[in-house]
Amino acid sequence: MERRFVSESRGAHAREDYPERDDKNWMKHTLCWFNAETADTRIDFPPVHTYTLSNDIQYIAPKARTY
């Protein structure tokens, strides 16, 4: 369902109308909540953290898959 809202391609979530990934606008998690009582759905896109929780591990920046 989430791909309807995202105007980019990323990994297995490829779209022919948006062939490139767009980290500037879509480096986000996709969370969805469903309320069974009301049948309402809520979607949110919190940001991905670009840091680690330890000084022992270095952050690895994302990059496009190339084959």
Image: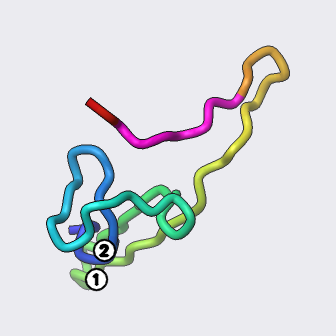
Residue 16: x and y in percent read 15, 66
Q: Which residue is at the front of the view, 57 or 60?
A: 60
* Type of amino acid at the residue the image marks with label 2: Asn
Q: At 37% from the left edge and 77% from the top edge, which residue is drawn?
A: 42
Residue found at the very far front of the displayed protein: 67
The image shows residue 10, relative to residue 4, as above or below, that is above
Q: Which residue is mark 1?
A: 40
1 or 2: tag closer to the N-terminus: 2
In the visual, does 20 lie left or right of 25? left
Which element carries disc 2, helix, strand or loop?
strand
Predominant SS of the magenta segment: loop
The colour mode here is rainbow
Q: Is residue 61 magenta?
A: yes
Residue 60: x and y in percent read 62, 30
Asked which quadrant contains residue 8, the reply is bottom left
Q: Which mark is residue 52?
A: none
Q: Are marks 1 and 2 in contact (CB under 8 Å)?
A: yes
Q: At 47% from the left edge and 56% from the top edge, which residue is drawn?
A: 29
The image shows residue 54, relative to residue 2, as above or below, that is above
Q: Which residue is mark 2?
A: 35
Residue 63: x and y in percent read 48, 40
* Type of amino acid at the residue the image marks with label 1: Asp
Which element carries disc 1, helix, strand or loop?
strand
Q: Which residue is at the front of the view, 39 or 12?
A: 12
Asked which quadrant contains residue 46, the reply is bottom right
Q: Which residue is at the front of the view, 13 or 34?
A: 13
In the visual, does 14 lie left or right of 43? left
How many angstroms separate mark 1 from mark 2 (CA)?
5 Å
Look at the image and give the residue range highlighted in magenta. 59-65
Neighbours of disc 2 within 10 Å: few (<14), some (14-19), many (20+): few
The quadrant in which the C terminus is found is top left
